[in-house]
Image (cartoon, helix red, strand yellow):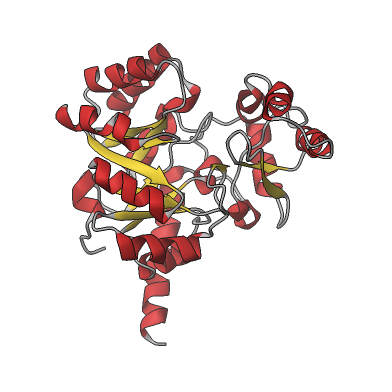
Amino acid sequence: MSTNRITPLFQIEHPIIQAGMVWNSGWRLASAASNSGILGLIGAGSMYPEVLREHIQKCKKATDKPFGVNVPMLYPNIQDIMDIIVEEGVKIVFTSAGNPKTWTSWLKERGVIVVHVVSSVKFALKAQEAGVDAVVAEGFEAGGHNGRDETTTLTLIPMVKEHIKIPLIAAGGIATGRAMLAAMILGADGVQVGSRFVASTESSAHDAYKQVVINTKEGDTQLTLKELAPVRLIKNKFYNKVQELYKTAPTPEQLKELLGRARAKKGMFEGDLDEGELEIGQISALINDIKPVAQIVEDMLYEFNLAKKQVEYL
C-alpha cells in the first residue's frame, strides 16, 4: 500500500488503527495489532494506573513496533495515567471524552504524538486548534461512547475533511476492506477499527461476550444513555431495564443509579450477559467469526486491494 499521511505519522505499514476499547484492548490485542503492521492501542479506560503500567511493559516486550494508549479524559486519576505513559516511553496517545486543550500541549512537550476522537466538525476544529497531530472522526454507528447528534460516518467524514488540514482517521462501522476503501474515498487518510477486533482471539473480552457479538444481528444494538455519555449497547436484560426507566422521564441521577459501577466490566470482561453493559458497533451484524488479529488485518487488506481494483473498472 502506498504511503499516506497516517503511515509515516505513526511509523506503521498500513493506515489502520486498532481502537483502544474499554475491557477489550489489553497488551495482547495491542501488540498483535502492531505486529500485524497496523497501530495497536491499549485501552486505558478500564485500567487503574499501575495496571496500565503493567500492560505497557508487557506490550513493549511483545512487540518492537509502535503502539499507543487510548485515554478517555473523564477519569479522576488522569494525571497518574499520563505520567505513566510518559515514564514508560509511549509516544502515541489517543484522547477522547474531554477537551483536547487540557492535555495536548503537555503531551506534545514530552514528545508524544496526540490524536483526539471527535464526533462533529465543531469538535474536529477545536482539536485542530488545540494542536493535535490528527483526529479520529467517529460516526454514530460506532460502539462505545459516541456523539449525541447521531451523525453517520458516511456524512461525518466528508464534512470534517472539508474543514481541517491535519490527517483524518475515520471510525464507526468499519470492519472490512471495502468499508476502509469507502472511508478513504470520502477523504479519510486512514481508519480506526473497533468492533471487528473485539471478536479476535487476542481481545481481552470474555469469550461469552465475544460469542454474543458474532451472534448479533441487524437491529440488535441501540444508542442510549445520552444524558450521561451516549453508548451503543446490545439489547439485553440490562438494556431493557434502561428502556423501562426512560418511560418515567428519569433524571440523570436516576440513570446513574441504575447504571451503577463497573457495569461494562461485568458485561464485557466478566461475561454477565444479562446484567452487564455490552458495548458494540452496528457493524457487529456483519461479524460472524472470531479470528486472530493477523488474519483480520490480512483479510481487510486483501479485500481493500480487491475492491480498489474493482472501483477502477467502474
Q: Look at the image and tell me in which quarter the N terminus lies.
A: bottom left
Which residue corresponds to the image point at 62% horizontal and 28% vertical from the top-left? Answer: 264
Is 222 positioned to the left or the right of 1 in the image? Answer: right
Is 170 positioned to the left or the right of 209 in the image? Answer: left
Is 146 positioned to the left or the right of 298 in the image? Answer: right
Q: Residue 56, how many percent across, how many down? A: 33, 23
Instruction: Say if 146 sits above or below 169 in the image.
Output: above
Instruction: Say if 183 sits above or below 267 in the image.
Output: below
> Which image quadrant is residue 270 in?
top right
Is 69 positioned to the left or the right of 3 in the image? Answer: right
Which residue corresponds to the image point at 72% horizontal and 54% vertical from the top-left? Answer: 217
In the picture as drawn, the residue positioned furthest to the bottom comes out as: 314
Q: Residue 141, how many percent across, how many down? A: 57, 54
**Considering depth in this image, is 90 or 306 the residue closer to the camera?**
90
Which residue corresponds to the image point at 46% horizontal and 32% vertical from the top-left? Answer: 25
**Considering depth in this image, is 192 or 161 the residue closer to the camera?**
161
